[in-house]
Image (cartoon, helix red, strand yellow):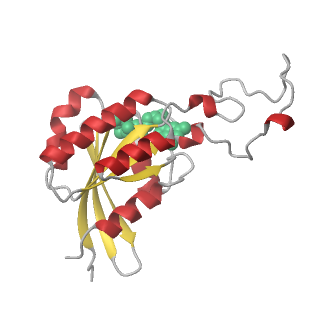
Amino acid sequence: QDRSVQVKLVLLGEAAVGKSSVVLRFVSNEFQANKEPTIGAAFLTQKCRLEDRVLRYEIWDTAGQERFHSLAPMYYRNAQAAVVVYDVTKASSLEKAKTWVKELQRQANPNIVIALAGNKIDLVQPSSSTPTSDSEPEEEADDATATPGEPSGENGENLRQVPRDEAEAYAQEAGLLFFETSAKTGEGVVEIFTEIAKKIPIE
Ligand code: GTP
Ligand code: MG
């Protein structure tokens, strides 16, 4: 028999930060490079196994486009958990995340567990080792290793607009769980849902 506890979770955040992609990674372990914007909201479920229990997440993935903002209360009302997503390569998306956190703290269930997730860290982290200044080759006009169309530089650091420390300090001050994630590589995604699950009280 299914003894798993159901947990209603809502995702909020600016358009295109990767809410649907984070959910797709968690639910199906997949990534789509050209995911279409969500219209209204999408509903998905996924089990989450802890050492001592299993939770069944009922996930409301909301649309970030401004014209859908007024629908959000329908989805966060009665939610036990929220994941507020921003994009580490877009500073304005953290400001939008902060306004969502304020709205949740005023209007949602007072016991709601809120996680802040800085997504798209694959765009600001090298997959190989970090180059050091003395091992750096000279720039050449006909650099055959350059990858046209790739937005990041040698180590991608130029794309980061939100320092980890700054977002983490805000999260701590506001009482939020904090993660940096990549829906593309999967980094940090399962951790969001597992750490939230640990904070959901046993009924
Ligand atoms: P709305 O539904 O409009 O609110 O957008 P959303 O927050 O659900 O964003 P979505 O998941 O649709 O992703 C937007 C775009 O960013 C898509 O092209 C994704 O492929 C891309 N994307 C999402 N997550 C990541 C990530 O972690 N890394 C990279 N490189 N791209 C990502
Ligand atoms: Mg979406």
Residue at x 49%, y 56% (from the top left corner): 29
The answer to which quarter of the image holds residue 46 is bottom left
Task: Locate the N terminus and report the quarter of the image it occupies.
Answer: bottom left
- 168 is higher (above) or lower (below) than 56: above
- Image quarter for ligand 1 equals top left
Residue at x 43%, y 48% (from the top left corner): 22
The answer to which quarter of the image holds residue 193 is bottom left
- Which of these two is toward me, 161 or 23? 161
Q: Is residue 174 visible?
A: yes
The total of numbered circles placed on residues is 0
- Which of these two is toward me, 112 or 120? 112
Rendering coords of residue 153 (x, y %): 68, 29
Residue at x 41%, y 46% (from the top left corner): 169
Q: Is residue 63 visible?
A: no
Residue at x 83%, y 33% (from the top left corner): 136
Task: Locate the C terminus and report the quarter of the image it occupies.
Answer: bottom left
Rendering coords of residue 50 (x, y %): 39, 75
The answer to which quarter of the image holds residue 94 is top left
Q: Residue furthest top?
A: 141
- 198 is higher (above) or lower (below) than 112: below
Rendering coords of residue 35 (x, y %): 44, 37
- Which of these two is toward me, 136 or 83? 136
